[in-house]
Amino acid sequence: MPEAATAQAARATIGDSEFDRDTAVTLREPGVYDTDLSAGWTIIKAVNGGYLLAVLGRALADALPHRDPFTISAHYLTASTPGPAVIRTEAVRTGRTLSTGQASLFQYDGEGREVERIRVLASYGDLESLPDDVRTSAEPPAIPPMAQCFGPEDGPAPVSGSSAITERLKLKLDPATLGWALGSPSGKGEMRAWFGLADGRDPDPLSLLLAVDALPPTAFELGISGWVPTVELTVHVRSRPAPGPLRVSITTRNLAGGFLEEDAEVWDSKDRLVAQSRQLARVKLA
C-alpha cells in the first residue's frame, strides 16, 4: 500500500493522536500535574502559546468537575522551552453549570530555580448542555476552497527554524493574505486559513485553544517579520466543533507602542462560530 494511503488509513482520533499525547498531563497529587512540553510545537525554539494553553486546559479539565473550557485567559510570563514542566491548579469556585479555576505552569532554569511560565484563569462548563438558539450578525470568513489555498510546504519557512509546529498542522492559507510571503505585504493585518491537525484528528474544544494561535502572525501582512510573542491571550469556546476542517480568521486593527492585538474567529464545517479570541502581542520593531 502506498505511504500516503497508509497514512490516511491510520487517521488519528480524539484521544489517540499526537496532539493528545503531547498535551497529556499526569496527576502527581491533588491539584498538581506533571507534563513534558514537546519540541514539536515550537516556533524559533519557543513553545507555541496555543499549544501551551491546550496543555493547561487539559489539566484544568481534569481538576474541575466540568470538562469543557468556556473562557480561558492566559498571561505569558516567561518563554517556555521543550521539556519537563509542572502545572499547579486550584478550584476557585464550583457551581452547578460553571466551575472556575486557575493554573500555573512552572519549569526550572539553568540553576535549578523554579520559574513560572504562564498563568491562567478559566471557567469550565458543559458545551452539550447549551441551548441551540443562535442570534448573530457574524459571518464565516470568505476563504477560497482548500485546493486553491497554500500551505507552509509550498514555500520556505517565514522565519528560520520556525517549521516544527507546521509539520503537525494542516494549514492552507488564503492567497489574499499571503502578500508577505511574496515580498509584498498588504498592510491590512489580516490572516485567514483552513486549519486542521496533520494526522487527521478532528477538532474538539481543547484543540480550539491551539487553533486561535496557530496561523502566521498578522504582523507579517503589516510588513513586520520576526517573533511576535504573546503577552496575554483570552479564548471563548462557543460550541463543540463538528468534524472536519476549521476556518480561522485573524485581524489586527491597531499596532502602537510596539504592541498589537489579534482578534480571531474559528468556524467549523457546519458554518458555526465555535471559538473567538483576542490576544495582545509584542512586536520587535527594527
Image (cartoon, rainbow, N blue to C red):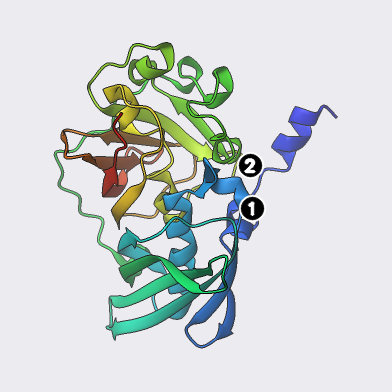
Quadrant (top left, top right, bottom left, bottom right) of the N terminus: top right
Which residue occupies 57% across, 34% down?
A: 161
Which residue occupies 41% across, 72% down?
A: 104
Please name whichever residue, 232 or 109, is drawn nearer the observer in this view of the structure.
Answer: 109
Which residue occupies 33% across, 70% down?
A: 124
Q: Mark 2 points at which residue?
A: 199
* Residue 189 placement: quadrant: top left
SS class, disc 2: loop
Q: Is residue 248 placed above or below 120 in the rendered structure?
A: above
List x then y, in percent, for residue 216: 41, 32
C-alpha separation, residue under disc 2 versus residue under disc 1? 7 Å
List x then y, in percent, for residue 75: 31, 61
Specify the amino acid type for callout 1. Ser
Which residue occupies 16% across, 33% down?
A: 253
List x then y, in percent, for residue 48: 47, 48
Residue 90 visible at all: yes
Q: Name the residue under label 1.
A: 17
SS class, disc 1: loop
* Residue 223 placement: quadrant: top left
Q: Is residue 240 placed above or below 163 in the rendered structure?
A: below
Q: Are marks 2 and 1 in contact (CB under 8 Å)?
A: yes
